[in-house]
Amino acid sequence: MKIVDGPFAGFDAELVSADGPRLTARVSVFGRETTIDLHRDQVERPEEMPELWREEEDDEQVRAGLRKRTAEQYDDLAHIEKFGFFLDRADLPEHDPAQEWDAYLGWCTEIDARAVRRKAAALAAFDQEIAPLPAAEARGRMAADPGRWLPAEAAMKERRSRYPGLDGPTPEERLQAAIFGGPDPAPSVWERAHHRRAAARSAAELRDYAAWKAANRSPAEDERLRSAAAAQVEHKRAAIEARVARDWGFRLPDSIFRFRTFLLSLCPAGNQAFHDLDLSPFGIMDLFDDPERRSRDGIDVRVHGRYYRDPPEFLTFMHGGTDGLHFGLWYDDGRTCTGVASYYNNDGGGVGLPTRTPLEAVRDTLEWRWRDLSSEDGEPADLLDPDVVVRRHRLRLLREVLTTFETGDRDEQGEDYHDASGHSPELLEHGDPDRLETLDGGGALVEGDTLIEGGRAIEPGTAITDDTMIERGRQRPWDDYDFCTALVKELTGDPAVRAAHVTEALRRCAAGFPADALALGRDLHWISAGDPEREAQANELLTTAYRALGRDNLAAIAEAHHRHRDLPQVHVLEGT
């Protein structure tokens, strides 16, 4: 039998004994036999070895499983035959990869048509010849004629005999390399075939994309759209900046105007690609067409686009289309944008550390979608689906436009992009040295106010024995499950305990140390969950801390949000 999982995966083994799901097997390692313990699910289960099959299955269940396996074998056979196209060409000179891909697609069409007929015939034969037999005899009959009932296994056996070293290094060679190190082995014929297939697909997709782009995007029209977009944004920029500064007290960053210019410069296909990402400008962006647009009577304009759990530092500029996903500019000091944060209002998870720009947030989303439109090996999810092909063309077009504004120095795509542009190991391990941990995941930034000692935020000279002080570490890009779970339980449990925390935080704020009031206020704001007492405590803590820090505009935003937290929707501008 063959081991398929665990440290000995790939080894051939001899079954010594079976005790339910526990197996004892013998393998040869470097020419010496050794006995190992395995679980039944770690090995292939050939039909001629009934010891490996589940004893609790009755004959009908076994036959149903054998029929399903036969169907899967014919499906797998089609994949093996398709890949054989490149396997047979792995070491041939490459002349026209795109044309080779076209030939491959024609080959796939023939294989698919033949596979349907073969599978139907095999299952009909199974129902006549195998299904009436007892389970043990049915297994034996299938094992005796693998070419008919297990054609994928038979095909792979034939491939391995035709291409020695098809799977690359042997299990022993891999084990030896893991133990002793050494140079990387030469690519196997299987790997070379995969590389040739990927190169052919890429060449064909780029060729087809060039033709599609020529029909959907004119360079002259691109220039006209971009020039008009830049002029429109520049024309209204001063009025937009004045409105936001007057009502919110924020300075808008240059990056939000680049985001607006990018949106206005998209051709119809680019706009469709943006909407394919389930993204749409929202919140503060609703003022860019009309900077003097007002809110409906009786509603403070500062709550437009402000979801129930949004911290006051969060200024929404884009909606994500599902579960309340939205993106916001982040203002720690109430004046200057620190970066972009995002979260799902209707789901778990916090806002994360604020970083980067609006266009980088779009690029992040684009590359996740690019990955989703690919299979695990980087190939399109469905090679012949015209919708998949066109959606990839549109995403490629959107990426081209976006990288003329930002991220043009990052050539990676899909998951490779995220691997290359993720948080630093230092930040992941130790957190942001300037931010106290908060339940919303954004962290509280208070310069010169607290020290972090032994995982606790303290004011200089304060003993760390006071039970009313909350232990906080540095904010990491991910939520600390243990910290969040324990603190939520503490703050939503005994009201007297929560009140003691609030009283102490306010006392320390009055003494000139507002960090605890800010962090606790953000915590209670995040977990208010419609509780009037927690809402009121959050508002008192936040407004007191912000005013102590000279962030009066954030205090005003917190108060406005507190007055309107029961609104049924976040659209409050006239006409929405």
Image (spheres, rainbow, N blue to C red):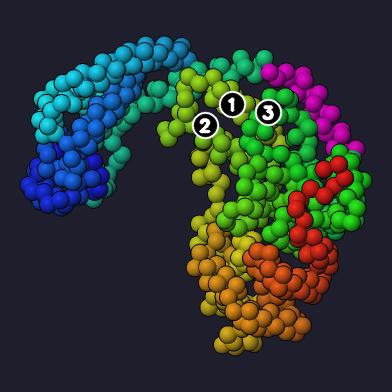
Identity of the amino acid at label 1? Arg
Distance, label 3 to label 1, CA atoms, is 9 Å
- Is residue 325 toward the left or the right of residue 51 in the image? right
* Camera-nearest residue between 46 and 247: 46
Residue at 74% of width from left, 41% of height from top?
A: 281
Q: According to the image, label 1 marks what residue?
A: 391
Q: Position of residue 351 (x, y in %)?
A: 63, 56
Determine crowd level at label 1: few under 14, some 14-19, many 20+ residues with C-alpha closer than 10 A: some
Determine crowd level at label 3: few under 14, some 14-19, many 20+ residues with C-alpha closer than 10 A: some
Identity of the amino acid at label 2? Leu
Residue at 40% of width from left, 22% of height from top?
A: 197
Q: Are marks 2 and 1 in contact (CB under 8 Å)?
A: yes
Q: Is residue 108 depicted above or below 515 in this figure? A: above
Q: Where is residue 424 in the image (x, y as percent from the top left)?
A: 54, 55
Identity of the amino acid at label 3? Gln
Let me know if residue 576 is in the magenta part. no
Q: According to the image, label 2 marks what residue?
A: 373
Res 568 label: none
Distance, label 2 to label 3, CA atoms, is 16 Å
Q: According to the image, label 3 marks what residue?
A: 272
> In the picture, which quadrant includes the N terminus?
top left
Element at label 2: loop
Distance, label 2 to label 1, CA atoms, is 8 Å
Q: Where are the magenta residues, as a range?
A: 216-235
